[in-house]
Image (tube, rainbow, N blue to C red):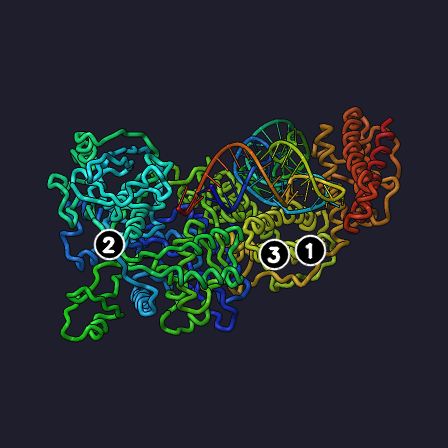
Amino acid sequence: MTIDKTFDPAAIEAKWYAHWESTGAFRPARPDAEPYTIVNPPPNVTGSLHIGHALDNTLQDILIRHARLQGKDALWVVGTDHAGIATQMVVERQLNARQQKRTDFTRDEFIAKVWEWKEESGGEITGQLRRLGCSMDWENERFTMDEGFSKAVIKVFVELYNQGLLYRDKRLVNWDPGLKTAISDLEVETREINGKFWHFKYPLEDGSGFISVATTRPETMLADMAVAVNPSDERYAHLVGKNVRLPITGRLIPIVADEHADPELGSGAVKVTPGHDFNDFEVGKRAGFKSSEMFNMLDGEGRVVQTSDGLIPQEYIGQYRFGIEGEPTNARKMVVEAMDALGFLEKVEDRVIQTPFGDRSGQVIEPWLTDQWYVDAETLAKPAIEAVRSGAIDIVPKSWEKTYFNWMENIQPWCVSRQLWWGHQIPAWFDADGKCYVAETEEAAQALAGTDVELTRDPDVLDTWFSSALWPFGTLGWPDQTTELDRHYPNDVLVSGFDILFFWDARMAMQGIHFMKEVPWKTLYLHGLVRAADGSKMSKSKGNTVDPLGLIDQYGADALRFFMAAMESQGRDIKMDESRVAGYRNFATKLWNAARFAQSNGISGSHSIHAPKAELAVNRWIIGEVVGTVEKLNKAFAEFRFDGMADVIYHMVFDQFCDWYLELIKPAFVDGEKGEMGAESMIVAGWVLDQILVMLHPFMPFITEELWHALGDRPYDIIHAKWPEPNATVDADAVREIDWVIDTISKTRSFKAELNIPPGARLTANIADPQPSTIAIIERQAAALSRLGRIDSFAFTPVETNNVAQIVVGGDTVVYALDGIIDLDAERSRITKAIEAAAKERDALAGRLSNASFVEKAKPEAVEKARADHAEKAAEAERLTAALARLG
RNA sequence: GGGCGUAUAGCUCAGCGGUAGAGCACUGCAUUGACAUUGCAGGGGUCGCAAGUUCAAACCUUGCUACGCCCA
């Protein structure tokens, strides 16, 4: 197969992906090999590929492809998340567009519609992950609500309940009045908004005066149950124990002493609304109120309802808590106006208020007293903390450990019930008295309750994260003891953005350790966010998102992937830089053309992963470069340094292989130069190119597979090739020889450019007093020196003229006679600059060496190196000085 | 208020104790032969500021400044 002149990523990407998938290349099919496992963070079934997915999945694919090349039984588990709230919102929006709403249907009808939507429109992202080249095990694609996974979720719920680690409780929750469901602490986002601070006078019951309170939520006074003052606050000591006659409702409430009241803030006295404020709930409990007695004055949408004492005036009932679009009035406004009319409004201040918002709905969260299910996270967190402390889980980069510990050590009960329809319905049934029976099936619950008892199932569903926390083992067949589970749990590494460290990673650690008695993964690799070019966070609302598919269309998936790897340094976000994506497209093109050159010269794939035997220095040298590259790559993989990996392979391909090696062996392929050198170079070049393709494959899977096949008839695809094991070492003699050649050529090019001598000008070189090794090198490398350095010949005699350009290479001074074309002043100034540079370094080293403390205290290697460097620089400066003198 | 991170060439970033690096951008030159999605050569940095530790600091310590994120 002849390689096309132009590299067209689109032409090869679809072809190879389909080939891999249809041949089962992504399946773990090496039962005798060491397993290697990653589970993919399941994207929302409603989702489409954004730039963050591109990063996250590229990193995972690099690790999986690398493991596969190492011969491991690599499994990359893939699937999608049912994403309770997000998916229900999508389908509800569709209904709204047809003037329908969820409640027009029965629960079963609605759920059927969501499944229908999922089958037709869900999972767009799975096709997009394929475009990125991700080698996931699609044949075992999972869904967090598929049958087997649902079984695992129900089992976990029941077991945690039976172990007392999951319980029902009446307490304040974060209630989202937009979505009309409880949400967890993590789903609440605190933002600062400009609000007001209202100061009210509350009249004392005995008519002896007033106590001032200030509040940011005046409407909640309809459910006030106390006024609190600080026990140390002498201004109010005499009032503690007295009662206040609450305006509007006329409720009689006590003045209590509580540390929560801050004497410095406002008047120092605060109103206490236990049913609608987290702090007040605690104050209320300390004041002796049971949670069942606490007043609730709002419904699920944030409208006023009557409190249990029936004291809220009728006109307030049904009013929204505060301003809402399209509503003429609201409870807040009415309370403030009423207090003003009564003469109880002292003043109103502007104030910045920390306000909780639902992260999905954007609504102001209402603390609301309801019955919900809670997981005892504190108990589950303990072994998960220990796992990181002991090193059973290695968090990379380590700096995240502190954040992990800090959160886990202060973890709160996790509210896991949601008032939605789409999700895992909670396996709990209630009898007429509200007694609860938790079991995996209705039959089992009935058995617990007794046959005569009529049961109703809890209508709520579980938090999506409750189910996805089981991903590392639920996808492997748990609770059944499958071979997959046995082989692939614990997973090797989890790759995730730090933004879901608490939401998902920590909860996986807790559930995994609890149910499997082993950590879910040995390494937790956390990466940053991909930011817009200006450093701002990408968001749809800002309109500054970059579409990874657009980048793939423009530059190819390989280029985008390489960009992600190259930019991924630990503990830092990635700023989008399209010019770098373009740069890596150019890199791919470079490789493509190098392969074309190889092919057109009859170079083809090798048959061994071990380095071929080589006599020529250039071949021994490039084999050594491969050895060095493999070592550096292996180290970077061991340390999860993706940027390091990219850097190493990039320079190997571009600099060592294309810029020098191919150029140096060209004479072997050109008639009239050195045809007899060709055979060995062809074999070595073919082998080196193979090693490069394999090493590059995890980063650029498409182009490497294409070139792999273009360069030979292969017994297997590159996706299943073997990671390089050159079985060779770096050859110091070869390195010295090729370094001399490269240095001579570079310095010759450089002086030409600086002296305005055409780069094509062919010159003769003189070395008056060459070292014997130099003569041998020149004999062997004459063709390369001629072709790349434009040096026709070397003479080992002094030149006759003073019109010369001179370069110092190692211990040799190479002199070019340039009568008639050289600008001697320019050459003098060029050499003077070089002398200054060498002398500066020489003197710096001399200064260091003359410092007795350095020689005494520094590491011996450092002293030795300084001596050697000093000798070298001194010799260079001396040679250059002599060269300058020769110019007259 | 607590924690974390970042500050290095015009831009995006490596380097984290022994002579400042890459890619892009910029300047000059080249070019029919793998490659203009090119090649060669070059200019450009008191490594945020200050003090300290050390024979030696971009790198370690402390403080400060600026920016970002997380938690309360």
Task: Please tell me whether mark 3 sits on a helix, a strand or a loop.
Answer: helix
Q: Chain of mark 2?
A: A
Q: Amino acid at mark 1?
A: Gly
Q: Is residue A368 visible?
A: yes
- CB under 8 Å between callouts 1 and 2? no
Q: CA distance from mark 3 to mark 2?
A: 54 Å
Q: Is residue A5 visible?
A: no
Name the residue located 61 percent from the left edge and 63 percent from the top edge: A609
Closer to the N terminus: mark 1 or mark 2? 2
Crowdedness near tag 3: few (<14), some (14–19) or many (≥20) residues, C-alpha within 10 Å: some
Camera-near label (3 vs 2) is: 2
Task: Please tell me whether mark 2 sits on a helix, a strand or a loop.
Answer: strand
Task: Please tell me whether mark 1 sits on a helix, a strand or a loop.
Answer: helix
Residue B52 is situated, as x and y percent measured from the top left of the image, at 69, 39
Q: CA distance from mark 1 to mark 3?
A: 17 Å
> Which quadrant of the figure has residue A445?
bottom left
Q: Which residue is mark 3?
A: A635
Picture layout, residue A8 above or below residue A137: above
Crowdedness near tag 2: few (<14), some (14–19) or many (≥20) residues, C-alpha within 10 Å: some
Closer to the N terminus: mark 3 or mark 2? 2
Q: Amino acid at mark 3?
A: Lys
Q: Amino acid at mark 2?
A: Thr
Name the residue located 18 percent from the left edge and 58 percent from the top edge: A107
Q: Which residue is mark 2?
A: A370
Q: Which residue is mark 1?
A: A624
Residue B61 is situated, as x and y percent measured from the top left of the image, at 62, 44
Name the residue located 24 percent from the left edge and 65 percent from the top edge: A428
Residue A848 is situated, as x and y percent measured from the top left of the image, at 80, 40
Instruction: Tell me: B2 left or right of A603.
Output: left
Q: CA distance from mark 1 to mark 2?
A: 70 Å
Q: Chain of mark 3?
A: A
